[in-house]
Image: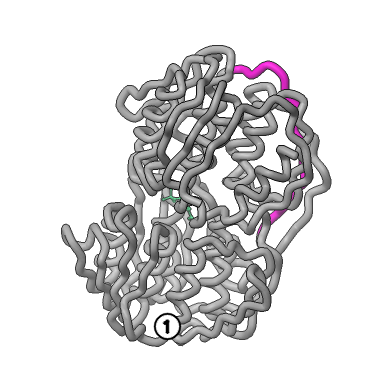
Amino acid sequence: MNSYTVQKTIRPLSGTLCFPGDKSLSHRAIIFGALAEGVSEFTNVLAGEDCVCTRKAFEDMGVRVESLSDTHLRITGRGLRGLQAPKKELYLGNSGTSMRLLLGILSGFDFEATLTGDASLSSRPMRRVTDYLKQMGARIDGRDSGNFAPITIHGGHLEPIRALLPMASAQVKSALLLAGLFAEGETAVTEPSKSRDHTERFLSFFGGRIKEKDLTVSITGGQALQAKSFAIAGDISSAAFFMAASVLAPGSQIRFESILWNPTRTGIVDVLKRMGVVFEMGPYREEGPEKIADFMLKSGELRPFEIKKEELPRLIDEIPILTVLATQANGRSVIHDADELRVKETDRIESMVTMLSRMGAKIHAQGNTVIVEGPTPLHGAKLHSFKDHRTAMSLIIAGLIADGETIVEGLDCIQTSFPNFFDLLRTIRK
Ligand code: S3P
């Protein structure tokens, strides 16, 4: 489906929803399963295109990945040094996580591989990882001195580094920690604020040892990882669209089940609470390296919110849907210094400001700061996704509260992270 027409919701939304596996966790499950010794099994793995790209890349490097169902994978690990040179280019579609994490891993292997992607991925900055990997000893070629795909990498003998990152980025941190697994000695990565910590959790859970102190994570190279099996938690970034729908349609009763509950990812929950939303939490459970929770939301009048730069990494993927929520809050919401949004699958400041303005929202950007005045009634409009999955889904949710008919075009991109988005939308509108 490449275009969708959404009418305003007049009735409250209801239902019990389980979400596809978290995208960040699904990538890492495939990566760690491939590098571990032994056979790992994961259920509720995201079958979205991004994770399929990661899977195919490892299969192209000799890793056996069996589908026991669409979302249940059995991976026979090849151990730390066991990947084979790919016979063709590794195509990573739209997935920045696949490309950056693979660059880190491939810098540990003495063979050549070329990484390619779609037009969006080929315009996203890779220098943020390739400069460090070159310092560690990898040979890297690509447009603009290894900044843009296609990128050819030839790794091998790696020296450890101490990297002081200019931006908080889990992709960069993870690429360097994974490269550090192959370096001789201790690699340390320091961020300006803490980004999602899944790689650190996976490293420990699969039997590796890391050290964490304040904003620095260190790893000593050469450690073997052991296979593990677990269920992947529901994606909190996908659930965020339905959390917003639940808040925006008064009287809604949506139950969220088995959602990833990791403090480096629950920034959206904190902002919703500041807006006045009440979370009724079910019991927490451990699932492999992560915690999961069930919950329901209760909301009334919405307060505006402010998000400072330090908080951004904990909700970086939720900014598009938060701009939609801000249009209905009672006052001025401000998202400060969101420069990282400019280099996502599309420029998400540009996409949300232009599309929500078209619906009548009072939203503008001052540099990289986004300002939204609410509450404003939205009206239906003809919109496009900028080929970005999170922009697309945010606009569809905005359409639920807009008068008249909203048409969103360019929706194939939703397949990258949330293949059953429309099924769940139908469930809550019944
Ligand atoms: C991701 C990290 C984030 C996020 C992306 C997934 C990850 O990117 O936006 O969707 O799995 O490590 P950055 O770390 O570059 O901000």
| Percent coordinates x, y for residue 144 in the rendering | 16, 58
Q: Is residue 299 magenta?
A: yes
Which residue is more in the foreground, 135 or 18? 18
Q: Is residue 176 visible?
A: no
Overall secondary structure of the magenta stretch?
strand
| Percent coordinates x, y for residue 54 in the rendering | 47, 69
Left or right? Give the position of 40 relative to 322: right
Please state which amino acid type lies under the numbered disc 1: Met
What residue lies at 39% left-to-right and 47% top-to-bottom?
387
Left or right? Give the position of 260 relative to 88: right
In the rendered image, the residue lying farthest to the right is: 283
Which residue is more in the foreground, 92 or 261? 92
* Residues in magenta, as a range: 290-303
Picture quadrant where residue 348 is located: top left
What residue lies at 67% left-to-right and 52% top-to-bottom?
19
What residue lies at 52% left-to-right and 15% top-to-bottom?
376
| Percent coordinates x, y for residue 244 in the rendering | 62, 33
Residue at image mark 1:
61
Which residue is more in the foreground, 187 or 61? 61
Picture quadrant where residue 304 is located: top right
Q: Is residue 31 magenta?
A: no
Quadrant showing the C terminus:
top right
| Percent coordinates x, y for residue 79 in the rendering | 52, 84
The answer to whether 116 is drawn above or below residue 7 in the figure is below
Badge 1 density bin: few <14, some 14–19, many ≥20, Cα 10 Å: some
Q: How many marks?
A: 1
What residue lies at 52% left-to-right and 64% top-to-bottom?
27
Q: Is residue 235 visible?
A: yes
Which residue is more in the foreground, 274 or 184? 274
